[in-house]
Image: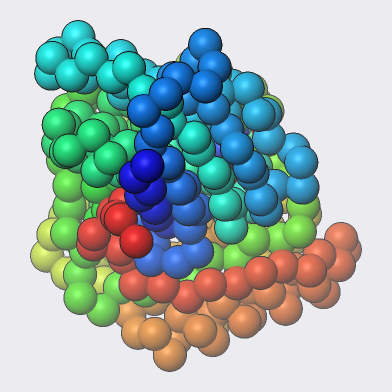
Amino acid sequence: MKTVKGFASATVGNVACGFDVLGFAITEPGDEVILTLSDRAHTDSPVSISAITGDGGALPLDPKKNTSSFVVLKFLEYIRAHKQIDFTGHISLELRKHLPLSSGMGSSAASAAAALIAANELMGLPCSKMELVHFAIEGERVACGSAHADNAAPAILGNFVLIRSYTPLDLITIPSPEHLYCSLVHPHTELRTAYARSVLPQEISLKTATQQWGNVGALVTGLLTSDYDLIGRSLVDVIAEPKRAPLIPGFFEVKQAALDSGALGCSIAGSGPSIFAFSSSEKTALAVGNAMKEAFLHSKAHLQSDMWVSPICKEGARIL
Ligand SMILES: Nc1ncnc2c1ncn2[C@@H]1O[C@H](COP(=O)(O)OP(=O)(O)O)[C@@H](O)[C@H]1O
Ligand SMILES: N[C@@H](CCOP(=O)(O)O)C(=O)O
């Protein structure tokens, strides 16, 4: 018997203007996956889920439906076909969820990334982290019906990740400026990723497109040059935020509270309902996060929320 524990932290997809093409990882919180390898096949499937904690019983135990076990199945198929590793044993998977579901914090991606980093360790590191991203993206298709990489890629790789192309997959990791901090606030309500995607327009005007890609280029430039003002000016989303903000009670009050407290910029984390803000110091990020929590509480919905302040995670998914 051999046991390995993997960890992957929360991620923020889109990063305002980068819908489906930009995301970053924070350091905490995250999901843990414990894999136990045994020589004998216990069931027809080479992977089974022994336990899930922290999900309130919401997640599927079927190994083909839970993102954590599904990606391990895909990983085993891949190393058999491309790495000449024919796995004949059994892997028992325990998932410990510390990320809230349907939160905008890349919950399904974190489960998948933690499982993949553990499986790769268990099988003797046959794949690079970049190879593992492919399986994590397929896990997103199982979780919410779309194979978007802006949570999956940073969950595995850390840092900021720009997805230049999906076919073929072309990912660029972008280092974070030294003094960039994220305030992430999760209101106690759910917004399913699949639904939040269903409200988006299928077509946009040329004017809207030029605004959006101008900001993506400026945001990437700001990150690469540590230009904090440019980062803040670039956090403008004219595609998803206008459609999704009405789905988040108190969004506009929370965003204004963040900016009034010194945030560089603020927008929806992923597909929401969480909201993130960037600051150029940890002290400001803490003040911004607290102001955002207060704004949720005093909004019409009187929402309680959880708040984290974090630098950008540079390591990505890792073994504990
Ligand atoms: N292991 C898993 N962890 C989280 N969500 C999962 C998992 N397996 C399946 N899902 C489903 O994935 C969907 C996407 O939600 P989730 O990823 O939690 O949202 P977000 O990415 O906004 O945090 C949810 O409907 C959830 O039930
Ligand atoms: N690009 C995706 C990001 C979804 O992030 P999640 O954390 O809410 O799953 C989208 O905007 O749908």
The tally of labels here is 0
Q: Dividing the picture into quarters, in which one does residue 200 lie?
A: top right
Q: Is residue 157 left or right of residue 16?
A: left
> Going 40% across and 33% down the picture, which residue do you hit?
38
Residue 140, image x and y in percent? 47, 28
Q: Quadrant of the N terminus?
A: top left
At x 42%, y 42%, the residue is: 35
Is residue 161 depicted above or below 203 in this figure? Answer: below
Q: Quadrant of the C terminus?
A: bottom left
Residue 243, above or below 234: above
Whole-percent x, y for residue 224 in the image: 13, 59
Residue visible at 17% across and 59% down in the picture = 175
Looking at the image, residue 164 lies above or below residue 180? above
Is residue 212 visible in this depiction of the protein? no
| Residue 14 or residue 262, whichever sits in front | 14
Q: Nearer the viewer, residue 56 or 193?
A: 56
**Is residue 192 or residue 214 the one in the foreground?**
192
Residue 64 x %, y % = 54, 18
State how the image is colored. rainbow
Location of residue 307 in the rendering, given as x and y in whole percent from the top left corner: 60, 72
